[in-house]
Image: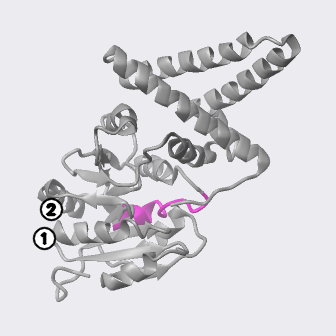
């Protein structure tokens, strides 16, 4: 798909997808409605969808590639190998580009055509800022300082992509962090451009969904001893499991529920400190609620550690 099929493709949109029937059509339409002035193509890489994702994509008249059973990193790489653009825009299947994104993207593409040592994009905005998880977590994450660009909205040059051999397909998650880390090693600049405004449709709204999300995202931290020891979150997750097990034993031996209560107090205390470190103090209500969400975050990451011990792997886009 190109806005000028007689011109050489300049920009390639790469969209990995796995059972994304709920959002994929809207994501593609948003690109078409807010497209850059440069000739572009849209490539969807399906990782083995069993819902109506493929039918929806075929109706959109874009390039569809099969990558059944692969990681999200391999899906992104496969999309690039099939692409033509000098500029690569990686968009997840539940992320919408906006009119303000369109106002900024041509300048970004121009910069990348002149300087290939650049990785840009932006943090997602939330669709409903009033939803409690969005308000106390995801909205605040948009303004977090970070040294990497999330793979769900990452823009770079083909030259840089090839220079660092793309995404590491051994990663189930955190492939974007690894990509940016290797890009910086060859001199690339990592720029989070908030003017490239995008909306994320797939954020969880329920506690169990949030925990499941963090459980999946955290698994990569436990795939090697080095990754575990260099991840503060992974170390906190291990301490959390040790505290819980130890205090459960104390509760049983002493038949006193105060030990179990002590666990929740300790977990919440750690979450308060984490909130202040990550977001600052803010208002008291914001501190209380965000700390509660941080507790859920650590529960999810602790479950990642248990999954690793049990050898459980959950593939997901």
Q: Which mark is residue 27?
A: none
Mark 1, secondary structure of its residue: loop
Q: Kindly tell me whether residue 26 is visible in this rendering.
A: yes
Q: Position of residue 301 (x, y in %)?
A: 60, 38
Residues at marks 2 and 1 touching, judged by CB atoms closer than 8 Å? yes
Q: Identify whether 179 is placed above or below 301.
A: below
Q: Position of residue 115 (x, y in %)?
A: 24, 57
Q: Residue at x 37, y 25 (%)?
A: 279
Q: Kindly tell me whether residue 280 is visible in this rendering.
A: no
Q: CA distance from mark 2 to mark 1?
A: 7 Å
Is 118 magenta? The answer is no
Observer-nearest of 173 and 80 = 173
Observer-nearest of 153 and 156 = 153
User: Which residue position is annotated with label 1?
Assistant: 37
User: Which residue position is annotated with label 2?
Assistant: 106
Observer-nearest of 159 and 50 = 50
Is 229 positioned to the left or the right of 268 in the image?
A: right
Is 167 magenta? The answer is yes
**Which image quadrant for residue 258?**
top right
Q: Residue at x 32, y 37 (%)?
A: 139
Q: How is the image coloured?
A: one colour
In the rendered structure, which segment of residues is drawn in magenta?
Answer: 158-170
Q: Identify whether 230 is placed above or below 5.
A: above
Q: Position of residue 156 (x, y in %)?
A: 32, 59
């Amino acid at each position: 798909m190109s806005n000028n099929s007689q011109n050489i493709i300049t920009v390639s949109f790469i969209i990995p997808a796995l059972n994304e029937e709920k959002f994929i059509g809207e994501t593609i339409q948003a690109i078409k409605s807010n497209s850059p002035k440069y000739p572009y193509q849209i490539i969807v890489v399906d990782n083995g969808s069993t819902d109506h994702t493929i039918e929806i994509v075929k109706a959109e008249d874009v390039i569809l590639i099969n990558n059944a059973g692969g990681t999200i990193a391999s899906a992104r790489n496969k999309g690039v190998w099939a692409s033509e653009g000098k500029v690569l825009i990686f968009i997840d299947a539940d992320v919408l580009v906006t009119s303000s994104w369109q106002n900024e993207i041509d300048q970004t593409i121009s910069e990348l055509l002149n300087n290939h040592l650049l990785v840009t994009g932006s943090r997602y905005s939330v669709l409903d800022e009033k939803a409690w998880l969005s308000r106390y977590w995801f909205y605040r994450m948009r303004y977090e300082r970070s040294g990497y660009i999330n793979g769900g909205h990452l823009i770079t040059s083909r030259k840089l992509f090839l220079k660092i051999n793309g995404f590491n397909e051994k990663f189930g998650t955190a492939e974007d962090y690894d990509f940016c880390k290797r890009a910086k090693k060859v001199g690339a600049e990592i720029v989070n451009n908030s003017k490239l405004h995008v909306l994320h449709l797939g954020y969880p709204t329920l506690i169990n969904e949030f925990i499941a999300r963090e459980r999946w995202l955290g698994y990569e931290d436990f795939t090697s001893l080095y990754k575990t020891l260099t991840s503060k979150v992974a170390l906190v997750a291990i301490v959390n499991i040790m505290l819980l097990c130890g205090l459960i034993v104390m509760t049983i031996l002493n038949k006193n529920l105060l030990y179990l209560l002590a666990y929740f107090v300790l977990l919440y205390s750690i979450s308060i400190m984490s909130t202040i470190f990550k977001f600052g103090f803010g208002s008291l209500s914001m501190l209380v609620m965000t700390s509660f969400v941080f507790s859920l975050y650590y529960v999810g990451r602790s479950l990642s550690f248990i999954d690793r011990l049990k050898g459980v792997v959950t593939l997901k886009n």
